Image (spheres, rainbow, N blue to C red):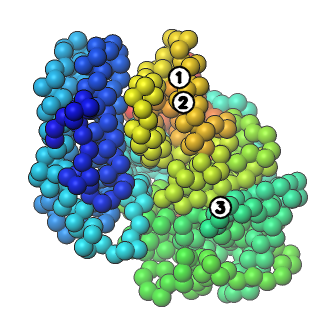
Amino acid sequence: MQARSDDRFADWDDERYSTDIDRFDEQHQRLFGLLNDLHAAMDEGHSEAEIGDILRELERYTEYHFGDEEEFMQDCGYAMDCADCFYDHREMHEEFAARVAEFREKHENGEYVTMEVLTFLRDWLDSHIAALDEDQNYADYFESEVDDDYDYTPGALRQGRRAPSTTDGPDGDAADPADAGPAGDPVSAAGPTSEGDSLAVPDGSVADWFASVATAYGDRTAALVPTDDGYEQRTFAELDRRARRVAAGLLETDLAPGDRVGIAADPGYEWSVADLACQYAGFVSVPLFPSFDADQTRRAVERTGLAGVVAAETPDDGPLSEVPVRADIDDLPTAEPAELPGRSVGGGEVATVVFDPADADPDGHALAHRSLLSATATLEADLPLDSGATGTCFLPLAHVYQRVATYYLWSTGGAVAYADPAGLVESLAAVDPTVLVGTPVVYQRVYGALQDRIGSMNWMKRKVAGRVAAYGRDKLDGSGTPLKYAAADRLVYGPLREAFGLADLEYALCGAGRLDEHLLSLFAGFGVPVRNLYGTVGTAGVGAMATPEASFAGTAGRPMAGLEFAHSEAGELLVRGPTVTVGRLGSDGRPAEEWYRTGTEGRVEADGTLTVE
């Protein structure tokens, strides 16, 4: 790789570097762009703060790109068919990432970063992408071995992994299901307790609640359904009518009120129809993650004793083929509804059995109608919304966090915008949401797309964009922003928010794992403050919420409305309140006043804030 005559330090050459996979070519070009920005900043004598910002961005983007590339290699089959190639490739990634981190640390410690360092990084990229053919190897595999209809969906592999709570884990570091939660022995609180605001606990069933919501908001938009031409609106009245008809159709099969009925499909409008239909029919819904493998699905089917299942297609083999009643989600049975039994179910009865997506051995949690409706009311109390808002649905609706978030939107008269996770960034721009229901993976993907867009800007705008994380840190640590931030927001950050559909956000939520300090700062600088939400499957996805400032200070925030937290002598977070599970499958239930063991290491501080390890 040679410097160009126009003084660009690292020059992209399609013939030499292109993998013919647009996603990774764009990411490689962004890495080249960051090296060029770093070289220019050093060569032109820019401030040490600006150089530090670019080094941190280079480190972060390297992490993002390498993770995405490695996941692609696993997802498309390359890692399995050429395991040695994959592990060698990953070792090279680790070597480069370690060197970048080393250079960044040296700079922060006051050591001078020489041009020899930049030359090393540039030559490493040249060797890795082109000379040694490391990236060309997986590109050739993709071209020759992968079916034309293959569609890579970033983040899908992570749904089946247990990951640290600081990145992508759903609930933090969970203890063994056999030892934690309602199935274990009762535990006592040690130290201070902390309570959220009071909450009026809803009574009645989910079906009865949604019937009242549909009556209140009848002709308003409840759902935005993706079509080839954009989005199509569905009103509350239409959603309610369809859910009732499907409930009546399912009741004309061999299913009866009280039966457990699985939902095994990707998120979408018809998923929500099936969910509400189960509630109207008086079934206990059992959402199954699309990422579950055959063994996980089999264990879930056996443990829950499914009497029926709504699936993406009627299964003829595999674990779901053994379920007595099977329905295709794209061809749900319907009938004229008469009296639907779900409306008379009591609030304390079980409404759903939910799973933790990262548990290798699924152990379901039973949630009562009161649990789901209390979680909905908790979000409504802590995140007030005017009617007419729009929120996102990118995550599996089998995840109780996303499902309760949809109930919250409906409860406030808002619409749920369903979207394919593969088109996440494009969907944000099309929808302009008021509420972004995200996870660390979602924000990492938005971050990657932002960096790609920044990489296409001119040098002056890239320089301004390079300060965004520093401006965000100033906001979050209370230092305030300099006067030139307003100009930066007008010139770069505001237009980026508009382009990415983030300009109208009232709430950007991050559940199922905490957003790290760098991304918190970066999004705060862009004018998108992200709230970390701590919750577990056993607490219906809610628990504690942290403002961006609280997260930056290292806490998990404070308990949400209706919930009380403590910690045990062993340092495990405990919680009680109306959202908490009534018991794991096979347990004898859990007294309402008993502490629920979350399986998360943490403590309640003297000021009432929570710390999650």
Residue highlighted by disc 2: 493
Question: What's the residue type where badge 1 is placed?
Answer: Ala
SS state under label 2: helix
Decide: marks 3, 2 in contact (CB < 8 A)? no
Q: Determine the residue positioned at 51% across, 57% down.
A: 423
Q: CA distance from mark 1 to mark 3?
A: 32 Å
Measuring from the top left, give residue 169's x and y in whole percent.
41, 46
Residue highlighted by disc 1: 488
Question: What's the residue type where badge 3 is placed?
Answer: Gly
Q: Is residue 546 left or right of residue 341?
A: left
Decide which of 416, 190 is in the foreground and name it.
416
Q: Is residue 570 visible?
A: yes
Q: Determine the residue positioned at 43% across, 25% down.
A: 460
- How packed mark 3 is, by other alpha carbons closer than 10 Å (few <14, some 14-19, many 20 or more), is few
Above or below for 538 versus 419: above
Above or below for 244 versus 13: below
